Structures are given as structure tokens and as C-alpha cells.
Image: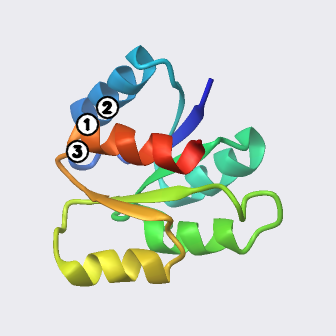
Amino acid sequence: MTKILLVEDNEDNEDNRDMLSRRLERKGFIVTLAIDGQDGVNKAKEELPDIILMDMSLPVMDGWEATKVLKASSGTENIPIIALTAYAMSSDREKAIEAACDDYDTKPVDFKRLIDKIEKLTS
């Protein structure tokens, strides 16, 4: 079973995070939650998930910095990361790729499209 680390704070809406994690679990994924960038880095190093869904607007350490730390760290450097952001500007996609994210998706999440990206990056 694919292990997903969902790094998403509850600042926007805790229900959105919980709904996404429940939908992923119903699809058969094992989901671990992290509530900020530093928590995400720590859990990624402990859990070694198959993929990380990283919100970019996070407290403590933002998703951009957390991604850079993970991609520069031995043991987590090859874990695929999908950036999740409420911003749908083309510059955000470029910024996500520059930060070494493997893919990018916008919020609100299109669940089918996100599942396709997860399966592509973990197969």
C-alpha cells in the first residue's frame, strides 16, 4: 500500500484536510498528517512515505523551504513531492518545480487528477 504524507495546516479549513485524508484512505492509501512544514520534514524523515502532498502556505516553515530541506536530505531526496497551492498562477508552477517539487496541483483539489498524479509518481 502506498504511504502518503499529507502536509497541510488547518488555517484554511481543517475540514478540507480531514476530507482529503479520508478520501485518500478510502482509495486504499495509508495517510499520515503533518500540520506545518517542520512537522512535515520530521515526519517524512521518520515515516519515509512513498509520496508527499505539500501545501505551500504553511506556518513554522513554509512548503517551499520544507521541500528544499527534504530534497537536500539523505533518505528523503528521492521521495516525490506534489505541491498543493491555492494559487493557480503559472509562476507558482514554475516556483514549485524550481523548489524541486515533482509535480504541482491547485486547491480546491480535483481528486481524480490528484490520484492520477500520485499513481504516476509512485508506479
Q: Are marks 3 and 1 in contact (CB under 8 Å)?
A: yes
Residue at left 72%, top 39%? 47
- Where disc 2 sits, the SS reads helix
Q: Position of residue 11 (x, y in %)?
A: 27, 49
State whether residue 1 is above or below residue 95.
above
Looking at the image, residue 21 lies above or below residue 99? above
Spatial CA span between label 2 and label 1 = 8 Å
Whether tag 2 and tag 1 are in contact, CB under 8 A, the answer is yes
Q: Which residue is mark 2?
A: 20
The quadrant holding residue 13 is: top left
**Disc 2 or 3, which lies upstream in sequence?**
2
Residue shown at the point (23%, 30%) measured from the top left: 15
Disc 3 to disc 1, how far (Cα)? 6 Å
- The residue pinned by badge 3 equals 109
Q: Residue at x 73, y 58 (%)?
A: 76
Q: Secondary structure at mark 1?
A: helix
Residue type at mark 1: give it.
Phe
Label 2 crowd (10 A; few <14 / some 14-19 / many >=20)? some
In this rendering, position of residue 69 left or right of residue 21: right
Can residue 34 be seen at all in this image of the molecule?
no
Question: Dividing the picture into quarters, in which one does residue 116 lie?
Answer: top left
Q: In the figure, is residue 93 to the left or right of 42?
A: left
Do callouts 2 and 3 mark residues in contact (Cβ within 8 Å)?
yes
Mark 2–mark 3 Cα distance, whole angstroms, equals 8 Å
Residue under label 1, please give it.
111
Residue 6 horizontal side relative to residue 85, left or right: right
